[in-house]
Amino acid sequence: MRDQPKTRHWIFAFCIVSSALFLTLLIVRPDTIEERIETLTLDYRFHVRNFIALPALSGEVLIVAVDERSLKEFGRWPWSRTLMADLVKGIMALEPKVLAIDIFFSEHESPKADNALGDVLFTAKDKVVLALPFDVWVGKKNTEPKNIPDAILNSAFLKVQESKNMFPVEADTILPTVPEILRTSLNGHVYSHPDYDGKYRWAILYLKYGDEFFPSLALQAARIALGLSFEETAITGDRGVTLGDNVLIPCDRRGRMLINYLGKEGTFRPISAAEILRKKISREAIRNRTVFLGTTAIATYDLKNTPFSANMPGVEKNATVVENILHGNYLTKSPGYIEIIMIILTGFATGILLPRFNALKGAFFSFILFSGYLVAALLLFVLKGFWLHVTYPAANMMMIAVVVTVTKYFFEEKKSREIRAMFSSYVSPKIVAELINNPEKAKLGGERKTVTILFADIIGFTSLSEQKQPEEVVEILNEYFKEMTDIIFRWDGTLDKFVGDEIMAFWGAPIDQPNHAELAVRCALNMEAKLRDLQYKWKLEDKCGLDCGIGINTGEVIIGNIGAAGKKMDYTVIGDNVNLAARVEKLTRTYNTKIIVTEFTIRHIDEVLGKGSVGHLQVKELDIVKVKGKEKEVKIFELKGTSA
C-alpha cells in the first residue's frame, strides 16, 4: 500500500531525524553504550568466530603456573622467595627467549630470601621482565611531584612521536619492586582497567608516569622475544606502537590495544610450577619460547573477566597479548566512517523506499537491511578481525523499521477498514483488494472522469407487483438482484445503487479501467443471458417472470463521495451523461429491445468490435433521437448477443 504524499513526507522526515539522532550518538559515543551494549555485541562475535573455527595457537608463548597442584605440593601462597628463586632458576635453565614474571615483589621478606631471588634475576639480566604495579586514581588525581626510582628508568620508552595525538593513561602512584630483587632487571606495568560491564577487553600498552612512558609487561616481553632493542621501539601517537621496521601494534589515543582473545581460560595450557621444580620438563618444551610465570590457583585472586570467561588468570590475558603481537593477530576497531556512511545511506534508503511498501513488505525490507548489516559486521570480524560498530547503525534501522512499520500497519488497517466498509457493497472483492493495496486510487473528494454507466430497469414491474403476492415478488426480486449484482462484480463493475426495481452501475472508477466500455457491454450481454436462464427457471417453478431493459452510455461525469457529511454518504456519479444513460434505458420499451447503447459507447468499443473479441454480438443502429436534457441528437444502437 503506497502512502499519500503527506504520509510519505512524514516517514521521510522521521527517517532523517532518527538518523541524525544516531549520528550524534556515534560522534559523542556515550560510555554507557560503548562499554555496555556495543562491547556485548563484540563478545557475541568472539563466540560465533570460535564456534565456526577455533583460532590456532603458535606454541611460542607458554605459561608456567603456580596452580592448585603447586600449592598442594609446595605450600600455600605466597611462596618464600628462596623457592621462587629455585623456580626462576629452573625455568631459565631451560633457555626461554624471555621470562615475564607476572608476580609482584613490592615488600621485603628477608635479606637472605630477597637476595636469593635477586641473584637469580641478575644472572638472567635482559631475559627477565618483572611486573611493576602502577595505580591510577579514580576521581581526584595525585598532583604531587612523581619521583621515579632510578632502577626503573631503564624500562621507559626512549622514543615518543606525535604526542599531540595522544591521551595516555596517567598513573598516580607506583609500588616498585624491592631493590634487592630489582637491581638491573627490566620492568613492565600490569595496570589494566575493565569496561563498565567488568570485562577486560583492552591491553594498555603503555602508561604515563611523570614525564616518562612505561611499556606493559606484555609489550616488554614481545620486544625481547622479537630481539629488538629499546631504540627500535617507539610510540607513534594514536597510530600505535612500532617494534622495529615491520611491526605496528594498533592502539587508540590512550595507548590501548584491543585484545584478540583466543578462547576461555586454559586456552594456553599451563605448565605446572611443580613440574619445573621437580625437573620433569624437558628443555625442548621451553627453549626459545616466551614464558610467562604467574598464578592460576583460585586462592591467588588474579582472575579476570573476559568475553569468554569470568575466571581467566591475569597471566593468561598477558600471554594472549604477546601471542597477538608476535603473530600480528590484531583486532582493528573501525574509526567510525563506515558507520556514518551506513547511517546516512540507510536513513535515506528507508525514507525513500518504506513509503512505497505496505507494512509487511516494509518490515521484510527492513529485516533484510538490518540482518545484512549484522552479517557483514560478523564476517568482517571473523575474516578480517575488524570491529565494525553495530549498535548505532543497527539501532537506527531497527527504530525506523519498528516505528514506520507499526505506524503504517495501523494506518493501513484503518485505511483498509474504511475502504472495505465504503466499497465492499459497491464493487467486487478483487477491486476492494486493489483499492486497499493502492488507496490513492480511491479519490473520494470528487473528480471529473470518463466512465461508462449502465442502467437496468425491470419492465412492467408495477403491474407485476399488483398481480402477485408481496412475498413472491420480493423473492423473485431478491433472486434477480443477486444474480445481476454477481454479474456486475464478475465484470469488475461498481454497483452504484438500487433505485426501486432499477440497478445502476458504472465502470472506470474507483480504479482506472481503460476498457471500461467493453466491460460494461460484456456485463450487459451476460445479464441478458442470465435473465433468460432465470425466466426459464421461474417458468418451470410456476412463478411469475420478469423482464428488463438495459441502457449504456459513456461520457464525462463528476464522481465522488456525495451526501450529507456525518449522516449518509454514497460513492456515486452525477452529470448529464448519467441522465442520458437512464433515458436511453427507457427507450428499450419504445424500440422493443433489451439493450441500447449510445454512439459514445460504440466509439469506445470500435476496436474490439472490429476484432470480434466481444463474442457473438450484433450491433444495429436504431435511430437518432433527441432526449430530454440534451440539445444535440444522439445515435442509439441495439446490442444483441447470446454469450458474454
Image (tube, grey):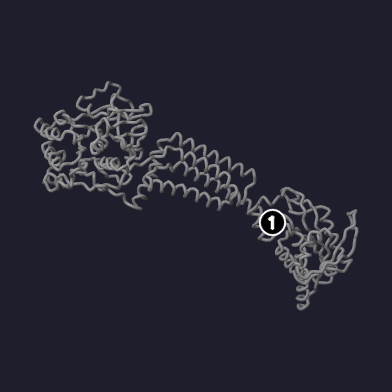
Residue 366 location in percent, x, y?
Answer: 52, 49
Q: At x 30% / y 48%, what residue is drawn? A: 263
Nearer-the-camera pick, 121 or 560: 121
- Whether residue 27 sits left or right of residue 72 in the image: it is right
Quadrant (top left/top right/bottom left/bottom right) for the C terminus: bottom right
Q: Amino acid at mark 1?
A: Phe
Say which of 242 and 275 sits in front.
242
Residue 477 rendering spot, x and y as whole percentages: 77, 68
**51 over 181 or under it: above or below:** below
- Horizontal side of 360 relative to 439 (left or right) equals left
Estimate the x, y position of residue 182 in percent, counting from the top left. Answer: 17, 30
Position of residue 448 in the picture relative to residue 353 (left or right): right
Q: Dot 1: what SS?
A: helix
Q: Is residue 466 above or below residue 385?
A: below
Say whether residue 418 is visible.
yes
As drawn, which residue projects farthest toward the top? 145
Q: Quadrant of residue 103?
A: top left
Label 1: few (<14), some (14–19) or many (≥20) C-alpha neighbours in 10 Å: many
Figure quadrant of residue 497: bottom right
Spot occupied by residue 37 in the image (x, y as percentages of width and height): 40, 42
Tell me: residue 537, above or below residue 173: below
The residue at which mark 1 appears reads as 423
Q: Is residue 461 visible?
A: no
Q: Is residue 300 left or right of residue 497?
A: left
* Residue nearest the viewer, comparing 328 with 430: 328
The residue nearer to you, when weighing 29 against 620, is: 620
Q: Furthest-front residue in view? A: 245
